[in-house]
Image (cartoon, helix red, strand yellow):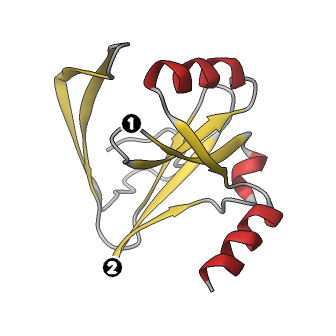
Amino acid sequence: MENKQFYYTGLELDMKVIKKNPPREFEVGFECKRLIKDCGFIEMKSNDQVTFTTESGGQYDVTRKDWGFYMGPSLNGRLSSFNLRPVLVKNRLNRFFMLLVEAGFDASFQKYLEEEQLSIISWMHTNNVLEQLERKVN
């Protein structure tokens, strides 16, 4: 797999990327349908990391561990440096999801919440909120 950010030729990664060409397309949503394109798989070995990026410089890392996946960066640290805020939401079927909202897209996110009838349980990006949660759990 070639990556222009690597300076050494011949550097191979352990992960296996399987592209779906064409991507599998399917609709999601209740009243407001959205088309999702399933573009492929990334098969990772322990301690492999993939970084997802946005056009504006946002980054989100996922690291494969021998026990599962480490989803970083930290909620109250590096995420904010990439202009991303984590938020815990609940849908109408009582399913919970962690979403990341990019700075400058609050109006679009609010519209999505309304269209999908999602409720915000808690923003998860400040020390205060995370420490309150920690106290409640303990």
Q: Is residue 7 left or right of residue 43?
A: right
Where does label 1 land, which residue? Answer: 92
| Distance from Cα at disc 2 to Cα at disc 1 | 31 Å
The image shows residue 61 at horizontal and vertical percentages of 53, 54
Q: Among all residues in the image, which is located at the extreme bottom?
A: 138
Q: Is residue 34 left or right of residue 5?
A: left
Q: Is residue 102 above or below residue 71?
A: above
What amino acid is found at the position of numbered circle 2 in the picture? Trp
**Residue at point 69%, 44% (across, down):** 85
Look at the image and tell me in which quarter the N terminus lies: top left
Q: Is residue 94 above or below residue 119?
A: below
Where does label 2 land, which residue? Answer: 67
Q: Secondary structure at mark 1?
A: loop
**Residue at point 37%, 48% (across, down):** 95
What amino acid is found at the position of numbered circle 1 in the picture? Arg
The image shows residue 127 at horizontal and vertical percentages of 80, 65
Q: Secondary structure at mark 2?
A: loop
Q: Decide which of 108, 1 is in the foreground and name it.
A: 108
Task: Pick whichever of labels 2 and 1 is earlier in the sequence.
Answer: 2
